[in-house]
Image (spheres, helix red, strand yellow):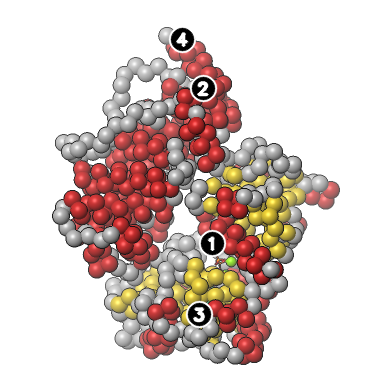
Amino acid sequence: MHRLGRFAMQKSIESFFGQKRALATKASPAAKKQRIEAPEQVEVKAEPKPVDSKPDASGTLEYGDLTNVFDKIEATTKRLEITKYCSDFFSRVLETHPHLLPQITYLCINRLGPDYEGLELGIGESIIIKALAESTGRTPAQIKKDYNQLGDLGGVAIASKKSQATMFKPKPLTVDIVFKRLVEIAKSSGQQSQSKKVNIIKQLLVSCRGVEAKYLVRSLEGKLRIGLAEKSVLVALSQAFVQHDLRLGRETLAPEAAEDLVKDVFCQMPNYETIIEAAINGGVKHLPEVVKLTPGVPLKPMLAKPTKSITEVLDRFSGEKFTCEYKYDGERAQVHCTASGSMHVYSRNMEDMSQRYPDIIDIIPKIRTPKTVDFILDCEAVAWDTAQHKILPFQVLSTRKRKDVESGDIKVKVHLFVFDILYLNGEPLLTKALSERRQLIADNFNLLADQFSPAVSMTSESIEEIQHFLDQSVKDSCEGLMIKMYEGQESGYEPSKRSRNWLKLKKDYLDGVGDSLDLVVLGAYFGRGKRTNVYGGFLLGAYNPDTEEYETVCKIGTGFSEADLERFHQLLSPLADPKPKSYIDHDPAANQQPDVWFEPKHVWEVLTADLSLSPVYRAGHHELGKGVSLRFPRFIREREDKGPEDSTTSDQLVQFYQRQVSIAD
Ligand SMILES: Nc1ncnc2c1ncn2[C@@H]1O[C@H](COP(=O)(O)OP(=O)(O)OP(=O)(O)O)[C@@H](O)[C@H]1O
Ligand SMILES: [Mg+2]
Ligand SMILES: [Mg+2]
């Protein structure tokens, strides 16, 4: 019986790979198209199962109901369709199982909770492979081999399960169980945690039916890769809220207005649970009254647009009141203090850095005045020479320890330069003018020598004075200037937006494209000559949030010290793969394929002379037909504060390119 089962399994896998190889991984739009055009080749067909119109007695929802929606989404590249599948499903869930909507939302975006709580699955491929092998009676080597061939572990899971003789029909998985078990995996630590994780995954896999195994495995990998961007999930939620209001006969908003409002509220309170609960209770229209900016919950910071000259700045702000500030080169620090006195520092991507910067936490009680209760400040933390009272380069800041930092042991001191206030004494300030916000900082906070002061600023419309201020900023060890709208509605704080009301002018980059780029390391080339034992060059890419893929941008081999190359070799070689992940958009026919590929993880800041269109590289090719590539790229530094999805997007590269072309015209 056992042998027979094994034989049958082998056979089915062969036929699976023999005929359907290209179809099992659906990441790229091209592959999706192929699948639509050749439906007869689709191996795994989901039987659409309607969601029960009434909650079952236990209030649970089958996981299969969700994975069926994933399957429909994966089969299309049309954004409207994707959003519709998603919002229809959310709307039905609101009707039948509203308490499950937060979990479902998190499963859709591959998260287990709000970003700022930092709960991550953190399981390596090898654990999934082990669990897959043990639960299907195959060896890890066989699974690995199939994986190399197919490029999608989710597809391998399905193929392996299909060929498995099951003795009994397991109870269906529910959304609730899957979510809880994923959280359990994320929270388990310590000696036994590896085997505990493998066991949980095995149990889940055994209960999977149909396409469930595919999406479960991809969720475990942390990448669903069905083209469902978080933006679309937010839009779908807003539409579902409107539907829900209508069903209850409540007053509601037009879909577009609801969409804008939900996005806006999410920027201020990036917590799906809070938003969903409030929308269920009071309707989408009243969200802003209930869900507000709150000290203790980080918000996505406002970002700036790059500019190449003072004249460009003057053109943009002509007729408006604007102000210039020093642009400090350190680390963004969002400083929170709640009414109960709890204090936090958050990074550019909302990570809690309070453990890393206990010295910043120590500053907080000293800068508040007797009338300052709760607040959120936006600052840059810069390395500081306390003897000379001077800014130290970013490189010095980056030598600070990242974990287990004790206030007493800190050698590299930091100075906080505050440039904005977003909340004060119970009141959000986002819509107030920058001039008023600056005044509130002056009125409610104490300066602290060598530790805390406002960003140096200057308000003038004269090109000479601005030029002088720019030169001065560089003499004072800054990168250049930030120029901001100062008065009126447009001078409000726009969380998460790269806004044209904040322009950056970086002295060193005025000759290039105006700014550096932050690109993801996708692959490497073996070194020759002096670089024989290290990688001699790397393939870099940009992120495309619409397709959730990484698009290749350029090869880079300049700007690295020998020590850099050695360190990167040590860091990256354990991650090396002979084949690229399926969600890397590259040209497989091009010469000069990298010798090894990596999972997109590390982000590097690079500089370029200019941008050009390339027949080989892919960034932005959906929009421009050809990809945008960098000429003479040079490595500057690692960006440890950016994850791969925070890297420069293909869209931004297209904008840089178009600006360059329009200036050349
Ligand atoms: N006066 C200031 N006002 C606003 N931001 C400032 C100021 N001084 C320094 N900064 C820093 O400059 C950053 C914006 O420029 P920078 O190029 O360093 O951004 P980045 O982190 O590389 O992100 P991106 O390139 O994606 O905009 C802000 O995020 C902040 O950390
Ligand atoms: Mg910076
Ligand atoms: Mg930058």
Res. 484 mark: 3
Q: Which residue is mark 4?
A: 4
Quadrant where the N terminus sits is: top left
Residue 628, placed above or below residue 218:
below
* Residue at x 35% of width, y 62% of height: 260
Mark 4, other Cα within 10 Å: few <14 / some 14–19 / many ≥20 = few
Give how far apart the Cα atoms at labels 4 and 2 are. Answer: 18 Å
Percent position (x, y) of residue 97?
Answer: 22, 44
* Ligand 1 closer than 8 Å to label 3 CB: yes
Percent position (x, y) of residue 9?
Answer: 48, 17
Q: Nearer the viewer, mark 3 or mark 1?
A: 3
Residue 490, placed above or below residue 644:
below
Mark 1, other Cα within 10 Å: few <14 / some 14–19 / many ≥20 = some
- Could you tell me the amino acid type at mark 1? Asp
Indicate which disc, 1 or 2, sits on the residue closer to the N terminus. Answer: 2
Left or right of 306 in this view: 437: left
* Ligand 1 closer than 8 Å to label 1 CB: yes
Residue 197 visible from this viewpoint: no
The one nearer the camera, 569 or 479, is 479
Q: Disc 2 on helix, strand or loop? A: helix
Q: Nearer the viewer, mark 4 or mark 2?
A: 2
